[in-house]
């Protein structure tokens, strides 16, 4: 099982949009996909209509976890937690680390959507993931969010992992190609992170929002999506290559 976390502390950067589309393309390719919706907003849970609920993700944070015997090919755990581990989250972190390998034989991929702002839940996601995709919004606080995520990566690599997490890359989201300030910001990010920046990016398109609202990927939206589909396809193809899962 390959596990991909989508994480950045910045709210509204595109984590859920990207995580759901990644899950959908993997599902369409026939893979067995587990989705971990670790955000209490549960926006991904609402969008992923064809994923069958395994209920709350709480058992993953408890000792003696066991995966339901016949977990559906497309399964989802949702963050229906009420802060019960917040006071002593080290046990919860130890438990998910010990439990996670049990999921491996049942699924080909695990996609993890994470909440905005830092918490031990984000630490858990970065601890168990193989690869990380970081969406960046080209607004005033976008570049600062990349600094936060690199600090988090350093901490988790030092304290929570035996092998450093693979950074699949940063992807610019909500890009307006005719916005000069954005293009300059994109060039500055490329200058700083080099090949860690995806060559593809996601433009600012209402279709991506509509797709999640209608609980379908943009390629199943009942609209003329010629202006928004190619960029999503190009991004997903690059993402698959970067996580080492093409073909
Ligand atoms: N490329 C895009 N073009 C237009 N709208 C977008 C794009 N990406 C995301 N959005 C919209 O912006 C909002 C935030 O996106 P999304 O929910 O994916 O971000 P998030 O990082 O998961 O947010 P949160 O931090 O609240 O979990 C949503 O309404 C979404 O539909
Ligand atoms: Mg989200």
Image (cartoon, rainbow, N blue to C red):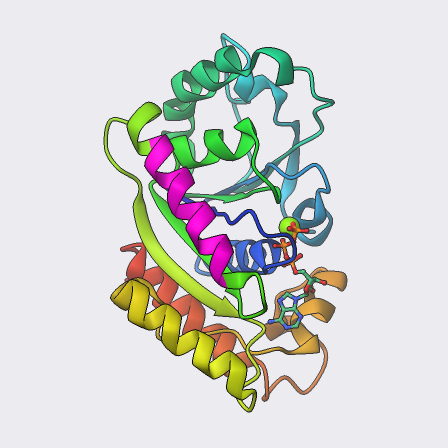
Q: Which residue is at 52% across, 53% downward?
A: 23
Residue 118 vs 44, above or below: the answer is above
Quarter of the view holding residue 226: bottom right
**Spot occupied by residue 49 in the image (x, y as percentages of width and height):** 70, 51
- Furthest toward the top, the residue is 64
Q: Which residue is drawn at 31% across and 40% down?
A: 165
Specify whether residue 188 is in view. yes
Q: Quadrant of ligand 1?
A: bottom right
> In the image shown, does 32 or 192 lie closer to the viewer?
192
Which of 5 and 224 lies nearest the eye of the viewer? 5
Q: Where is residue 119 in the image (x, y as percent from the top left)?
A: 57, 31
Q: In which quarter of the image is the N terminus?
A: top left
In the picture, measured across the screen, residue 98 lies left or right of residue 116, that is left
Q: Is residue 96 left or right of residue 206?
A: left
In this view, which residue lies farthest toward the bottom?
A: 178
| Magenta highlight range | 143-156
Residue at screen point 37% across, 40% down: 153
Task: Let me know if residue 146 is in the magenta part.
Answer: yes
Q: Can residue 200 be seen in this view?
A: no
Whether 60 is drawn above or below 121: the answer is above
Q: Main secondary structure of the magenta part?
A: helix
Is residue 54 shown above or below 225? Answer: above
Q: Quadrant of the C terminus?
A: bottom left
Residue 66: % across, % down: 50, 16
């Amino acid at each position: 099982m390959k596990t991909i976390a989508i994480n950045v502390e910045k709210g509204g950067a595109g984590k859920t949009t990207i995580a759901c589309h990644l899950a959908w393309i993997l599902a369409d390719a026939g893979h067995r996909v587990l989705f971990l919706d670790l955000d209490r907003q549960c926006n991904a849970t609402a969008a992923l209509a064809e994923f069958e609920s395994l209920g709350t993700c709480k058992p993953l944070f408890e000792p003696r976890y066991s995966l339901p015997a016949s977990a559906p090919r497309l399964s989802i755990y949702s963050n229906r937690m009420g802060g019960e581990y917040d006071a002593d989250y080290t046990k919860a972190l130890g438990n998910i680390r010990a439990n996670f390998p049990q999921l491996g034989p049942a699924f080909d991929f695990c996609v993890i959507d994470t909440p905005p702002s830092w918490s031990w839940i984000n630490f858990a996601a970065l601890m168990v993931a193989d690869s990380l995709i970081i969406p960046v919004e080209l607004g005033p606080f976008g570049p600062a969010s990349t600094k936060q995520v690199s600090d988090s990566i350093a901490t988790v690599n030092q304290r929570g992992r035996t092998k450093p997490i693979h950074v699949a890359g940063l992807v610019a989201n909500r890009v307006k190609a005719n916005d000069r300030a954005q293009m300059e910001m994109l060039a500055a990010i490329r200058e700083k992170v080099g090949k860690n920046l995806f060559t593809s990016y996601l433009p600012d398109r209402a279709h991506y929002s509509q797709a999640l609202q209608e609980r379908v990927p943009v390629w199943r939206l009942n609209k003329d999506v010629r202006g928004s589909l190619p960029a999503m396809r190009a991004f997903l193809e690059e993402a698959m290559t970067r996580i080492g899962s093409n073909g």
